[in-house]
Amino acid sequence: MSFDFLSFDLDAFVAATLAEDLGNPPRDVTSQAVIPAAARFTGVMDSRDAIVVAGLRIAEAFFRALDPTIEIELLVGEGGLARPGTDLMRLSGNARAMLAAERSALNTVQHLSGIATMTRTFVEAISGTGCTLLDTRKTIPGLRVLEKYATRMGGATNHRMGLWDAAMIKDNHVAVAGSVGEATRRAKAAGVASIMVEVDRVDQIEAALTAGATHLLLDNMDAATLRHAVALVAGRVPTEASGGVTLETVRAKAKTGVTYVSVGRLTQSAPAADIGLDFNLI
């Protein structure tokens, strides 16, 4: 597994997260008062529910940042399915350091595994349709790279990373430009190579395509309308069903022939995975 996704700085992320929890100067006042400096723990991180695992390497980095000599064994691969009661990681090291890193490590693995688990549920729901699941930009500020990593571990494909890597013309852009076609023409004239255009009516499709759209978002359309829209596009550009997609509706929309279906709730609403970490004094 690599975290070199858009040059993500794992060391900086770990340092900032630990600084948030430990303060300046860094300290865990409870452990310093109660636990001898030389005390050592063994620990086991385990899943309490069936989950898709994401973020164990990040958790490892938290522990190693505070105890470089810690012994860590990762027991499940990233993107792997863990049944309830599965051991994910075994640790042995300095007790104070392990307690200081525990919350940051658990929070990260629980959050990312929760996203990966929900994503896998959606991927399985559209299995066999030929449609690809996409994530969105509905991410927690500062965590986009990690959250989009987690959706990949769940089996999704990443949509654009931000406002910088593709144009996406939406209703506010259309309102200023005056029409879907004019907004699209302006983007093409500016030299933008990838121009995604959101349409919420089938009568906007031809105008967007004529003006240079390279990808159409078919927004908040029911399955019948999506099927009609796909027929009108006739394979000229990729199509994407977007807006309000739920686990109950995703398969019907995926079966309409769209290239993609995007789901904001993968990163916006995924519950944290139930993962625990128990320590024992050596």
Image: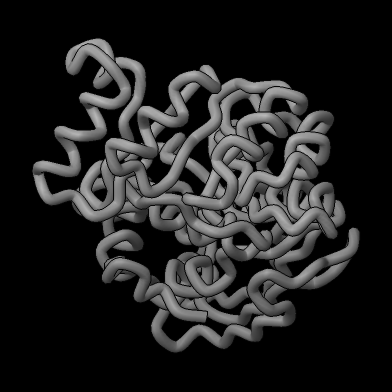
Residue, far left = 190
Residue 217 appears anywhere in the view: yes
Q: Residue at x 75, y 47 (%)?
A: 122
Instruction: Name the residue located 68 percent from the left edge and 37 percent from the top edge.
Output: 271
Q: Residue furthest right?
A: 84
Colour mapping: one colour
The one nearer the camera, 192 or 278, is 192
Count of numbered tags: 0
Q: Is residue 274 left or right of residue 66?
A: right
In the rendered view, would you say 136 is above or below 58?
Answer: above
Find residue 168 and report its horizontal and vertical position in percent. Answer: 32, 37
Against 45, residue 74 (above or below) is below
Determine the image quadrant of residue 113: bottom right
Q: Residue at x 60, y 48 (%)?
A: 260
Above or below — where is 50 with respect to 233?
Answer: below
Residue 282 appears in the figure: no
| Percent coordinates x, y for residue 19 in the rendering | 28, 52
Q: Position of residue 130 (x, y in %)?
A: 74, 58
Residue 169 position within the rendered picture, expressed as x and y whole percent measured from the top left: 31, 31
Closer to us: 209 or 24: 209
- Image quadrant in which you'd find residue 228: top right
- In the picture, measured across the screen, residue 87 lies left or right of residue 9, that is right
Give the camera-side residue of 190 and 63. Answer: 190
